[in-house]
Image: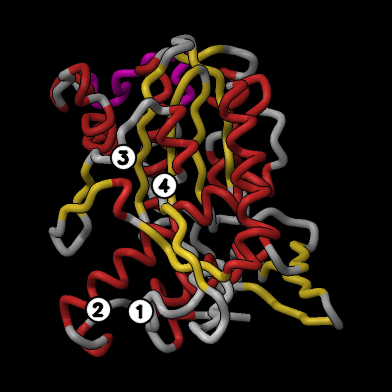
Amino acid sequence: MYNPFLTFDFSYNKCFLSGKDAKTLLTRVPLIPKWLLKQAELSGEEQIKLLDESVRSYSSLELPVDTALNSEFLIPLEEKMENAFSEGYSVVSKLAEEDLFIWIGKFLYGFIYAEMHAAIRAEGTAAGLNMSQSLIKRFGTHQFFIQKLYSDLVFENFKPWSITVVELADKNTPFSFRDEINTLTFSMKMKDFGIVACLQDNGTNNIFHQDILKEIEGKALSAEQFEELSARYYYSAYLFNRLPDYTIVPLKETTFIEPMPLRGAFNKPLFDVWQHKVYGQVLENFLKPWGFTLFEIIKNPEKPMSFFEKPCLPTAG
């Protein structure tokens, strides 16, 4: 299977999903799909700053993809997501998590690809990049998993992800998204739904937050509540202290993937100790539109501000 992180080849002369080179027919596809911009009522001229400080418009971000792969696999996935997003929470919430995983994974990997391309171009060579081996491994595994789009990959009795889809009380929520590529964490909201995803945690973040997930089940969240829920996931993804490893077994045309035990030889818990003050700093960033300060959020250090009737916050250390 293709792994561009072995050679750091992000030169746009190969399919970003399969690695097929320019000898095959390549096309360019928008990193942020046109249908998503249309539904979000965006022009595409909105700007985003990459890690190398360069500023790009949404519509200028493109990815190289094999034309046949695009027609046979990627376009049908985009059409499925487009139809679901147009209907809102009632349909998005019924999407197969696997489809959401691949679509979100492709979306997030697109930004990683663009960032890697920009970084290598700035350095002139991949040798100048300062990336840890663990991050290279995480990104390579992620790229491998989203190849499930066009390959017969089987996750044996596990899900590599934690994905939560919630209903929003405001049926006309403007589109926005954020991500943290180091932890492969992603969130977005639009219309009447919000999505939070941790893409390489083997489901542990959903287990970590199971109390609040039970509390909000069947309830539409306010804008503040969704941001608070998102902040919790971003912080817990940071606290997650394992790099999942997998056994990969190719058998004829199928590749079976099994997770190695997360605990391994370690005795310590899977998550580092939750600290309300640090969480408060994360939450402050998510609540910027409302102007809440860290002082207000952790005015009571043992009970940080919460917009939930039952906060169900993790026990702090």
**Residue assigned mark 1:** 11
Local secondary structure at mark 2: helix
Would you call the spot at circle 1 few (<14 residues within 10 Å), some (14-19), or many (20 or more)?
A: some
Local secondary structure at mark 1: loop
| 4 and 3 marks in contact (CB < 8 Å) | yes
| Earlier residue among tags 1 and 3 | 1
Indicate which label's residue lies in the foreground, 1 or 2: 1
**Residue assigned mark 4:** 32
Please tell me which residue lies in front, 161 or 33.
33
Indicate which label's residue lies in the foreground, 1 or 3: 3
Q: What residue type is labelled 2?
A: Ile
Please tell me which residue lies in front, 243 or 17.
17
**As displayed, is residue 214 above or below residue 116?**
above
Which residue is pictured at 53% across the width and 65% down the height?
A: 142
Q: What residue type is labelled 3?
A: Gly
**Residue assigned mark 3:** 44
| Earlier residue among tags 4 and 1 | 1
Which residue is pictured at 41% across the width and 88% down the height?
A: 7
Residue 145 at least partly seen: no
- 154 left or right of 71 in image: right
Q: Distance between the residues labelled 1 and 3?
A: 24 Å
**Residue assigned mark 2:** 120
| 1 and 2 marks in contact (CB < 8 Å) | yes
| Earlier residue among tags 4 and 3 | 4
What is the magenta range?
300-312
